[in-house]
Amino acid sequence: MEKDLFFSIIIPAYNRAHMIAETLTTTFQQTYPHYEIIIVDDGSTDNTEAVVRAINNPKVRYHKKQNEERAVARNAGFDLAKGDYVTLLDSDDFLYPTHLEEARKYILAHSFPEIIRFDFDIVDSDKNVLQISKMPENINAKIINGNYMGCSGIILKREIAVRYRFNGDRDLSGSEDYEFWMRLAARFKIHTPHIITCSLHSHEERSVIYNIKPEPLILRKDLLVKYVYEDKVVKKIFKKELNKFISNNLLYVSLHLAIAKYNKASISYLIHAIQYYPLSLFDRRFLGILKTLFKRNILTSFVS
């Protein structure tokens, strides 16, 4: 008889009373029955607690703590988890019904891997699919190019999650997951079966996508480079690609500054990215930045 794995779905939440019930509904619809749901309320000031407790589902465990950002909330979930594996889910995202069933099948067929990243889609508030995020082949090597992983839908061995944990620096928030995946990618094979089991919900409250502020963005990307390359294993594995990693993060900053119409700052970071890694000229983000700036005739006025 095949082993009945137990999963812990960890959901960090902050002021999500208006969204979390829909997210939870997708966890209750799982076709595989052996799991718990751990909601770590990161100091919500709205009625998130009342919404969760009103659901009254025996699979749900609710834990409220002081506000320390989502990295610490996820770590608290790791410590509370009873599962053989944990799966992460943001409080505004959705699981497809077969998420845990597909995870169990893959785990048993592949000798209990440490990390699984299924493909996922991105949907609007009406569940219309906007984009499909397909994981690249050999993601362990390619993760230096960008954070393909996200968080929702990730499957991790609980012991790995507890041992390595998210970095709790609040100023890193928004890039804490990328720093975590870089450390894990340097140590373990990331399995990427091409099955869509999760949806990322694109909406205007999503802080990483919208509401860009230059200073926090720049600080967290500086901290990302610092923390990633302070790790001895990461430094050993990705030593030759430090300049490329820095350049990729400078391009990220430049692109988001361009989107937010901080034009001169965007151009400055674009130039720095090329200086660190000249092949950035051929990166699709470089072209995206130029396209964004040219639409406003910014480059023309800048160089004239």
Image (cartoon, rainbow, N blue to C red):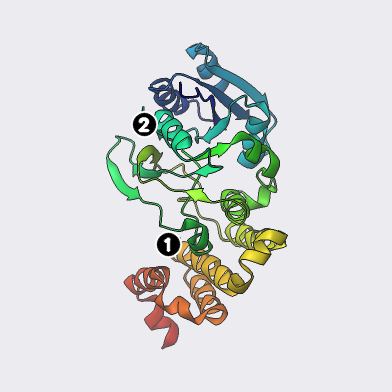
Find numbered disc 1 in the image and state the secondary structure of the residue it sits on.
Answer: helix
Name the spot of residue 292 as percent of width and height, x first.
Answer: 37, 68
Q: Nearer the viewer, residue 13 or 143?
A: 143
Q: Residue furthest left?
A: 128
Q: Earlier in the sequence, mark 2 or mark 1?
A: 2
Looking at the image, which residue is at 68% across and 37% down?
A: 162
- The kind of residue on which mark 2 rests is Tyr
Find numbered disc 2 in the image and state the secondary structure of the residue it sits on.
Answer: loop
Looking at the image, which residue is at 44% across and 64% down?
A: 261
Name the spot of residue 89 as percent of width and height, x first.
Answer: 50, 35
Above or below residue 8? Residue 298 is: below
Above or below residue 3? Residue 182 is: below
Q: Nearer the viewer, residue 83 or 39?
A: 83
Name the spot of residue 120 as percent of width and height, x first.
Answer: 38, 43
Q: Quadrant of the C terminus?
A: bottom left
- The kind of residue on which mark 1 rests is Ile
Can residue 44 be seen in the rendering of this structure? no
Residue that label 2 marks: 96
79 on left or right of 287: right
Mark 2, other Cα within 10 Å: few <14 / some 14–19 / many ≥20? some
Residue that label 1 marks: 259
Above or below residue 214? Residue 2 is: above
Residue 173 disc label: none
30 on left or right of 275: left
Name the spot of residue 125 as percent of width and height, x first.
Answer: 34, 36
Looking at the image, which residue is at 49% across and 69% down?
A: 251
